[in-house]
Amino acid sequence: MSKLRVGITTLISLLFSSSVFAEIGIDEKINLAVKPFADAVAGAVFSSFPVSGVQIPFVLVWLIVAATIFTFYFKFINLRAFKHGFELVRGDYHDPEAPGEVTHFQALATALSGTVGLGNIAGVAIAVSLGGPGATFWMILAGFLGMSSKFTECTLGVKYRNENPDGTVSGGPMYYLTKGLAEKGPGLAKLGKVLAVMFAVFCVGGAFGGGNMFQANQSFAQLVHVTGGESSWLADKGWLFGLVVAGLVGLVIIGGIKGIARVTSKIVPFMAVIYVSAGLIIILMHFSEIPAAFGAILTGAFTPAGVSGGVIGVLFQGFKRAAFSNEAGVGSAAIAHSAVQTKRPVTEGFVALYEPFVDTIVVCTITALVIIITGTWDPSVDPSAGVQLTSTAFESTISWFPWVLTVAVVLFAFSTMISWSYYGLKAWAFLFGNSKAADAVFKLLFLFFVVVGSSMQLGSVIDFSDAMIFAMAFPNLLGCYFLLPVVKKELNEYWADYKAGRLVKTRVS
């Protein structure tokens, strides 16, 4: 504990030093201060076991097993409710008088903005390079199974949300872990409180790091890369970039979930169209090579050649990318989906099916196909060079694409930051109270860390924050297992009304 206190004290003194951005070597000093407990937390969360010579993180197994169980428990809800989910997204059954703050589409856009990002651009390139084309098959399968996890946690998020006197709502795992498990008896009520606090602490840590500093850092790095690298005028102006981004983020998050939803509902479709269109153009320009690409994906999934660990190795790379990209089972998205206007919790579960579908099955697959078709995947790639590898793949066909990629990266990072600011704020409020003072403190800290993330290379901090995000899956999914019967009851009642035509349709197709 003494080492932990020393580390925290050193970190705080460095962060709030008046010369923090000018002092030489500040990055390394922060890394050294954080490293002892960052390594301990990351080591615990990402602890692994060997399978066919491949180290498999336990958290990955935890996520995939849960997604598989939920898929069978709800009889492939990811297939049979897909059409109705689209009807809800486009507003066919929207009730403006229902409690909540945003529409189904806005809730989905906010949640998507928190997951569609650098993982889709950089992570997929690494997965295909290390696992070969076959990793794409397992990535798609994991995304398909993850749809059921999103359905489960987002239904529970709405079911147990708090509706505040001012019309705002607070929801997410913190609330269904406490309120939902309390319904199961005194013993589980105590467990629920412990799990909820654990989740909230992990969520705040993840919001400051992976949902904030990492996004700012990587978007600035890409901007410097396309403007001349080390010779760029921006090379040593990370603090300036951070201040600009912090100002823009502040303008959005000050309006709460309604302001965030308004922005994400415009940014997400825009950035998706830019990125997906560019990917499809390249794929179509190599039209004759598409059959061979799909052949390589199917062959490589089951008979991989030259991939460490064989089938297990390629399966691991695909599952890892899907789980780390769409965050199905982590519980973060349930916080955003809980703000939806609806009287029937399961409706948002149906809408949430589209999150892993868009994030993994569509966007990640397009990235993978571009890399495979252009032949730019490299088994010896440095895992930190994912964005550059994807940029090279697109640039091989479209010379000016690095600039488009820069716009996409900045937009992805910006939208991820504003979504994670909401996730972190709700977790913060759960821990410290839903007051204006607590709200202001969190938002100021969040904006401060935008500047910190843009200005520094924070290796240990990012490792720590990544671990915090995936640590959220442990309390979240444990609670979901106990509450599966609640979700099934909501589903059966609603599905019976839907099939019998008892639902009021507010939009004519």
Image (cartoon, rainbow, N blue to C red):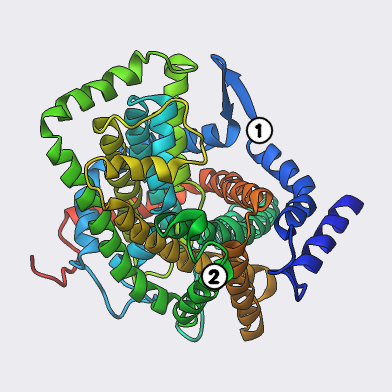
Label 1 to label 2: alpha-carbon separation? 34 Å
Residue 353, compared with residue 241, is above or below; it is above
| Type of the residue with mark 2 | Gly
| Type of the residue with mark 1 | Ser
At x 21%, y 54%, the residue is: 84
Label 1 neighbourhood size at 10 Å, few (<14), some (14-19), many (20+)? few
- Left or right of 363: which side holds 28? right
- Left or right of 375: which side holds 178? right
Q: Which residue has dot 2 on it?
A: 242
Q: Which residue has dot 1 on it?
A: 47
Nearest the eye: 91 or 443: 443
Q: Quadrant of the C terminus?
A: bottom left
Circle 1: element type: loop
Residue 118, position as x, y percentages in the image: 43, 51
Residue 369, position as x, y percentages in the image: 26, 35
- The mark found on residue 321 in the picture is none
